[in-house]
Image: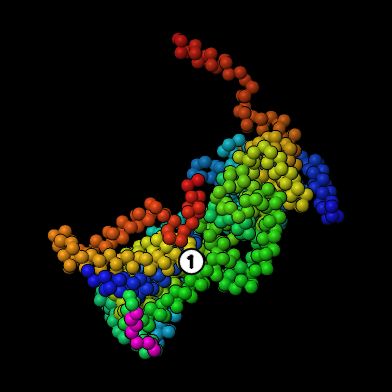
């Protein structure tokens, strides 16, 4: 067993590119689901819009990167309006149904044969669209004890975590303000909030769009890190992992999604690294587990871990048990 | 006592006197009505839940809305506060129409209600529940919320007012608890105090006393009377007749969706129509006769 390499990979991925992307998507979802109680199951759709805006506008249309990112944000706002206008007046579950379908529509459109010339079909778009941005990178790679990043990854990760810090700061400022109080009130009982003269519909729309824009930024980072977009990266699985991260960290907590994303990616990588090493080193007989089954088994084990968490710490890492007890009254 | 409060006290007494001259018939016009409703209808499928031809509520009085279960009292509340769309009807509050306005606009215009099944915001503290009630908060905009300097002073003022109200409603000791941890009676109190935070002109209470212990009921009644003296109009649904008699200046009786009687508490409680509606038209006919005939049939 090569423990140094196991820990190196696990800890690097804990703060790596994927963790940044999922963390941003989870910060957005936390505003919608954690604070406002909106069941948005289309976070993958928002991320896809951000990613494709960057890829299409830079590679196909030749726009500058910053303008493409801005259009990604505008796209997320329009997507949020499209989802919110018909559903936010209705009961919460309608939003869930509409968002999960809308996100799938976005993915299916992205991989459609008809739009192959513009969106690249199921292969997506690959191109050096963030070359100028990578050229700004003053750092070489980074290696210290258990952390190891390539030159490009390091640049993505540094910028990504700065963005995470900014988003978390904005969330913190908002949620201690009267605006955040209205949002939390809506989560508890929207009729009560309405009876106190607050335009509930407007607040729900703002929360949906704000969380969606943050989700689109996750997609932007994803596209810039990989220098490519593939439609199947934005399937409902992404949304569900993001939910796992929010619940793992503790919903309606500013640091919940950040710690949740770190733990999620650490566990995922750690489990598969340990199993890989164990199988290759002969500690686990290949009759029981082969290396190509590890990809599935790690999700089973993470799932098991989540079940245990829900049983013994249902409020998540940062949650308050006292709050949760109120639901049972 | 300030001159202002004696003024309003006289106002209240005057209002009561004016009502003494009003004819106790359903749909009668009041001299200074704050609320006027016309042919308000709401039906669910074939069931006509509300069908109020005309109703006026006198300003600065306590008006009770009573009636047997299923009379449509709560539905009427829901309709006029914008929580339930009517099938037909118009109504105005302080001279401007509120018909088909969304609930939050109705509340902003000064008609603030509470709910029969209390709606406290469980995972917010009692104090946060109160602060939420305040109107025109600068920090409730998405962008101004990001700059605490914009709203901090107003927040402090709202907190002071909230603490005063909590003291009045005996909730100071639980101000930092989650509202979900309160007892049923305390929740009723919190909901009423929170509605007061919204600075209503007319406070609409849906069964404010249900589940509140008798000692507290007395102090709540005093609060309600005080609110009238502060110039508020109160319109409330209640089943407890003792309370209705004690506190209200005027009583409106609903049955099967319509207003069947209104008048002073004393008048309404002697009204044959009201007694029939509550107890059934044949409540004073002995049941034994029909009972006997049933047994006789069974024997035969």
Is B294 placed above or below A272 here?
Answer: above
Residue A109 seen anywhere in this rendered image of the structure: no
Question: Residue A140 lies in magenta, yes or no?
Answer: yes
Mark 1, residue position: A254
Q: Is residue B24 left or right of residue A273?
A: right
Q: Residue furthest left?
A: A287
Residue A202 horizontal/vertical position (percent): 54, 65
Q: Residue at x 67, y 66 (%)?
A: B154
Q: Which residues are magenta?
A: A137-144
Instruction: Pinpoint the chain carrying mark 1.
Output: A
Q: Badge 1, how many Cα within 10 Å: few under 14, some, many 20+?
A: many
Where residue A149 sits, quadrant-wise, is: bottom left
Q: Identify the residue shown where x is 31% and y is 77%.
A: A229
Near-viewer residue (B173 or B83): B173
> Where does the image place residue A323, in percent across and percent down from the top left?
50, 54
Which residue is more in the foreground, A270 or A155?
A270
Q: Which residue lies at the image location 39% right of the left edge and 52% below the top edge? A: A312
Residue A41, picture quadrant: bottom left
x then y, percent, for residue A93: 42, 56
Residue B5 in sight here = yes
Question: What x and y, as percent, mark residue A305?
Answer: 33, 58
Q: At x 72% / y 30%, what residue is drawn?
A: B270
């Amino acid at each position: 067993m090569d423990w140094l390499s196991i820990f190196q990979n696990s800890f690097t991925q804990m703060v790596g590119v994927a963790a940044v992307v999922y963390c941003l998507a989870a910060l957005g979802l936390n505003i919608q689901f954690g604070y406002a109680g909106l069941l948005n199951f289309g976070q993958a759709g928002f991320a896809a819009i951000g990613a494709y805006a960057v890829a299409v506008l830079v590679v196909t249309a030749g726009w500058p990167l910053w303008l493409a990112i801005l259009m990604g944000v505008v796209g997320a706002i329009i997507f949020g309006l499209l989802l919110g206008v018909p559903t936010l007046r209705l009961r919460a579950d309608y939003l869930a149904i509409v968002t999960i379908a809308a996100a799938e529509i976005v993915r299916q459109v992205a991989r459609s044969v008809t739009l192959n010339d513009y969106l690249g079909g199921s292969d997506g778009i690959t191109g050096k669209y963030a070359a100028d941005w990578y050229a700004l990178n003053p750092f070489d790679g980074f290696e210290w004890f258990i952390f190891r990043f390539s030159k490009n990854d390091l640049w993505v990760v540094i910028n990504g975590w700065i963005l995470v810090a900014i988003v978390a700061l904005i969330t913190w400022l908002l949620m201690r303000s009267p605006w955040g109080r209205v949002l939390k009130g809506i989560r508890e009982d929207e009729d009560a909030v309405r009876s106190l003269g607050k335009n509930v519909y407007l607040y729900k729309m703002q929360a949906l769009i704000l969380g969606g824009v943050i989700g689109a930024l996750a997609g932007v980072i994803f596209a810039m890190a990989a220098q490519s977009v593939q439609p199947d990266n934005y399937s409902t699985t992404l949304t569900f992992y993001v939910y796992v991260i929010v619940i793992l960290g503790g919903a309606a907590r500013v640091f919940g999604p950040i710690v949740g994303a770190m733990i999620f990616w650490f566990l995922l990588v750690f489990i598969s690294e340990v199993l890989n090493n164990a199988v290759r080193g002969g500690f686990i007989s290949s009759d029981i587990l082969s290396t190509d089954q590890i990809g599935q088994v790690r999700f089973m084990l993470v799932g098991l871990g989540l079940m245990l968490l829900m049983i013994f710490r249902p409020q998540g890492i940062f949650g308050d048990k006292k709050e949760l007890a109120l639901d049972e009254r | 006592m300030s001159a202002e409060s004696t003024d309003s006290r006289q106002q209240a007494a005057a209002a009561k006197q004016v009502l003494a001259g009003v004819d106790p018939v359903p749909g009668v016009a009041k001299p200074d009505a704050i609320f006027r409703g016309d042919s308000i209808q709401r039906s669910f499928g074939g069931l006509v839940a509300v069908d109020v031809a005309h109703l006026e509520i006198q300003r600065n009085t306590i008006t009770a809305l009573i009636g047997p279960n299923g009379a449509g009292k709560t539905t009427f509340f829901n309709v006029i506060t914008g929580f339930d769309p009517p099938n037909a009807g118009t109504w105005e509050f302080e001279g401007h129409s509120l018909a088909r306005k969304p609930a939050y606009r109705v509340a902003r215009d000064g008609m603030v209600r509470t709910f029969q099944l209390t709606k406290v915001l469980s995972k917010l503290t009692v104090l946060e529940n109160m602060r939420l009630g305040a109107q025109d908060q600068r920090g409730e905009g998405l962008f101004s919320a990001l700059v605490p300097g914009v709203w901090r002073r107003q927040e402090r003022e709202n907190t002071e007012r909230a603490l005063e109200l909590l003291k009045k409603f005996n909730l100071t000791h639980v101000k930092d608890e989650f509202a979900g941890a309160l007892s049923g009676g305390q929740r009723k109190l919190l909901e009423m105090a929170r509605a007061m935070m919204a600075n209503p002109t007319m406070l609409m209470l849906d069964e404010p006393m249900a589940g509140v212990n008798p000692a507290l009921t007395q102090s709540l009644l005093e609060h309600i009377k005080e609110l009238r003296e502060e110039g508020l109009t109160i319109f409330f649904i209640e089943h407890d007749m003792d309370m209705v008699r004690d506190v209200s200046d005027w009583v409106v009786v609903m049955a099967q969706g319509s207003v069947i009687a209104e008048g002073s508490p004393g008048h309404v409680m002697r009204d044959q129509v009201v007694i029939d509606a509550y107890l059934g038209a044949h409540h004073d006919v002995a049941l034994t006769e029909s009972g006997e005939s049933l047994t006789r049939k069974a024997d035969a």
